[in-house]
Image (cartoon, rainbow, N blue to C red):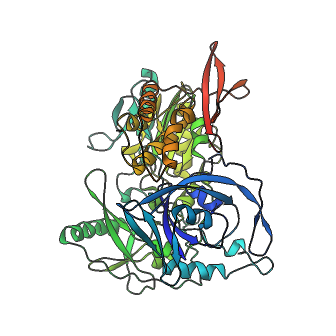
Amino acid sequence: MVVKLNIANFSVHKVLVDNGSSADIMFWDVVKRMGLENAQLDPVHTPLVGFGGSEVVLMGTITLPVSMGEEPRRKTLIVRFLVVDTPFAYNVLLGRPGLNAFKAVVSTYHQKMKFPTKNGIDEVTCDQKEARRCYNLSLKKGEDKGTMKRKEREEPKALEQKKFKPERMEPIEEFKTVELIAHQQGKTTRIGSKMSRRVEIMMVEFLRENVDMFAWSPSDFRGIDPEVIVHRLNVDPMTRPVTQKKRTFGAERNKIIEEEVKKLLHAGYVSEVQYTDWLANVVVVPKASSKWRMCTDFIDLNKACPKDLYPLPRIDLLVDSTAGYELFSMMDAYQGYHQIFMAEEDRIKTSFITDQRIYCYNVMPFGLKNAGAMYQRLVNRMFKNQIGSTMEVYVDDMLVKSTEDDHLKELRRAFDVMRAYGMKLNPDKCTFVVRGGKFLGYMVSEKGIEANPEKIQAIMRLRSPKTLNEMQKLTGKITSLSRFISKSADRSILFFKSLRKAKEFSWTEECEQALNDLKKYLATPPLLANPKLGETLFLYLAVSDETVSSVLVCEQEKSQNPVYYVSKMLQGA
């Protein structure tokens, strides 16, 4: 039986319920897609025996909250998963330990699983469509060992939590608006306010000389030459095309869709088509600015495309290599994905239906499964001689870093590369020559790395949790800041212990005191130093009965400054 469960606040599909399994298993690909690849796996020395009697190598164990059902009968327990790095058609295998913990009763005849809660009996039903799909995939086995060949393996669709998109780069200082084209209102960009007058004059002159690098509308750029790169879908030829049934919208949303399609047509991003085997609906979703955005529901097309395994950069490494420089310029590509063309033979597969007509994309649209990897492949190729030394790039966010004396030279190098490839910048989202800013969710400057004030305020404003779900949100917020929290496991151990007591949620006076102490600590968060290459570092350890903590420090100006905090709860604590 295949179901969908909430695991660590992710909606995880393709969970195989197997009461014949003596273990609860999570596959390494899913761990990575949940962003937990850097989590400390607890070691395990007991071998796992597979279906054919062969031993499977275990990477370790990970303990995560698992929720079944919906409120008011939602039930959450802590489940210890064995982590296995092996191809499999499912994302998670829920075996006897997990089923027994939930006191779940499985009926394969009724295709349901029932379990008791404090508010009565609840049930989870089988996702029969996913079950059939997984079964078909599991038939594609290797002939010798009964496991799927890696090339035949499908990437799990599993995680439907909002896809992680790092926060947009923002300066931390006041900025000035620079007019790029004289007497043309709106043709402006931003520069920092803390540079010398000499640098400011040179910077403004440089930007005006290179005004051709900016785009204010789609007509201002031609896109990346298809000889350099195009986006191909690589649809599985064994997959049957899907034509989604047309959805109906109200008059207001139909007007929004009509206006958005007009813009896309005028820009040349879409073309009208008549005959297509693949057809998707559009979706209108609210933006943070109280406006609406039109998206295309490519869920069926994405299922048919194997995942592009091209790696995205590790955010912590990008942040570490960015801090410590005197000046930064933060640049954003203009409608970045749309600067890459779709392969002509694949354009028809991106067809979508509106109230009036059917269209397909000529350029790479947002929402395609492998669009981010394709864009990262492009920028890595473009800036291969600068990344890691004078630039850092994460998809369409680009940052130039240097000393004050070299900054104009490095900007010119970056502009020359973009001009050669035909890439254009969005002037409204660029800020040049600043002393620091928010980069990928962290505050970076010459001084070092600081926690994002918004993440700190999210904890400072947090009320005392009253439900398990609120407790999970609290622990998640603490985890996102753990790099900046000394002995974070000691400070939060009561919260994690409370999560384990899923049958009876309790918030004690000790928990309240621990939360207040944490808020007091975060009122003055530390500045993490950025050590120089070859510098001597010191590691300090603190061990208690339930936790082990460490801090990496460096000596600067005769004082020791923290570089990184790490803290873990001991198994069985």
Residue closest to the eye, 571 or 418:
571
Q: Is residue 471 left or right of residue 282?
A: right
Q: Is residue 126 above or below residue 187?
A: below
In which quadrant of the rendered view does residue 506 lie? top left
Residue 273 image position (x, y, % from top left): 38, 82
Q: In this view, does 250 lie to the left or right of 385?
A: left
Residue 11 image position (x, y, % from top left): 47, 62
Q: Which residue is drawn at 35% across and 82% down?
A: 245
Name the outermost residue toward the bottom.
275
Residue 212 image position (x, y, % from top left): 43, 48
Residue closest to the eye, 338 or 196:
338
Residue closest to the eye, 566 or 417:
566
Residue closest to the eye, 10 or 116:
116
Say if residue 182 shows up in the picture.
Answer: yes
Q: In which quarter of the image is the C terminus?
A: top right
Q: Residue at x 24, y 66 (%)?
A: 256
In which quadrant of the rendered view does residue 560 lie? top right
Q: Which residue is drawn at 35% across and 65% down?
A: 267
